[in-house]
Image (tube, helix red, strand yellow):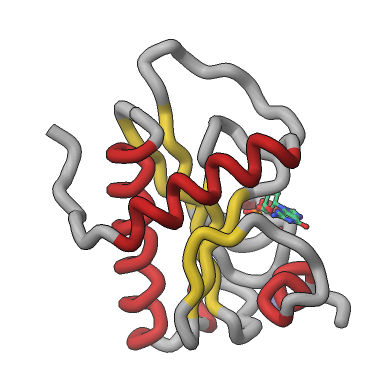
Amino acid sequence: MACVFCEIAAGSAPAYFIYRSQRVIAFLDIYPVEKGHTLVTPLTHYRDLLEVPDDLLAEIIRVVKAVAAAQLRSLGASGVRVVQNNGSAAGQVVFHVHFHVIPFYTHGVSGRRALKPDEGEAISRMLAEALRVDDTKGIS
Ligand code: 5GP
Ligand code: ZN
């Protein structure tokens, strides 16, 4: 399998999962911009946003919203940025469509760095737990 996100979806490559349904998964980015940086992607391989069927896109964006709420509630984030790159000119590196859900904190930007295993386990557990609580209230 050539696509790393297909491998993660199939369980043949590791990831810190925070959510899984029959069609959509969410897991921590291996090289987070900030603590809790999450990727939301469909299990099925689509190259980019334009290829994704609308009903699946609706499910993906609902997961994006729930992840954002979980980041605010359980990680103490103050804001959340949602990013979605299409095409190498726009910065897409993994050609399996995905949304970045990136929490931001009042202490300012800490800078991109590799995810440490203990951090990955702790953060993914907190986010997965927060996702089980149905609360998608917005940013006040
Ligand atoms: P893009 O630039 O394609 O929108 O973003 C790809 C993202 O995938 C990057 O933020 C990168 O850190 C992340 N990434 C690349 N390979 C892996 C991987 O094997 N595992 C995980 N969890 N994230 C990955
Ligand atoms: Zn794929």
User: How many numbered dots are placed on residues in this image?
Assistant: 0
Q: Residue at x 32, y 32 (%)?
A: 79
- Image quadrant where one finds the C terminus: top left
Residue found at the very far top of the displayed protein: 107
Residue 61 placement: quadrant: bottom left
- Image quadrant where one finds the N terminus: bottom right
Q: Residue at x 39, y 54 (%)?
A: 129
Residue 5 placement: quadrant: bottom right
Tell whether 19 sits left or right of 131.
Answer: right
Q: Position of residue 67 (x, y in %)?
A: 38, 54
Q: Position of residue 131 (x, y in %)?
A: 35, 58
Residue found at the very far right of the displayed protein: 2
Question: As displayed, is residue 138 above or below residue 21?
Answer: above
- Front-most of 25 and 42? 25
Residue 106 placement: quadrant: top left
Tell whether 52 sits left or right of 75.
Answer: right
Tell whether 129 sits left or right of 36.
Answer: left
- Front-most of 105 and 86? 105
Q: Position of residue 136 (x, y in %)?
A: 20, 55
Question: As displayed, is residue 110 above or below residue 122?
Answer: above
Q: Residue at x 77, y 63 (%)?
A: 14
Q: Position of residue 110 (x, y in %)?
A: 58, 17
| Ligand 2 quadrant assignment | bottom right
Q: Residue at x 34, y 51 (%)?
A: 130
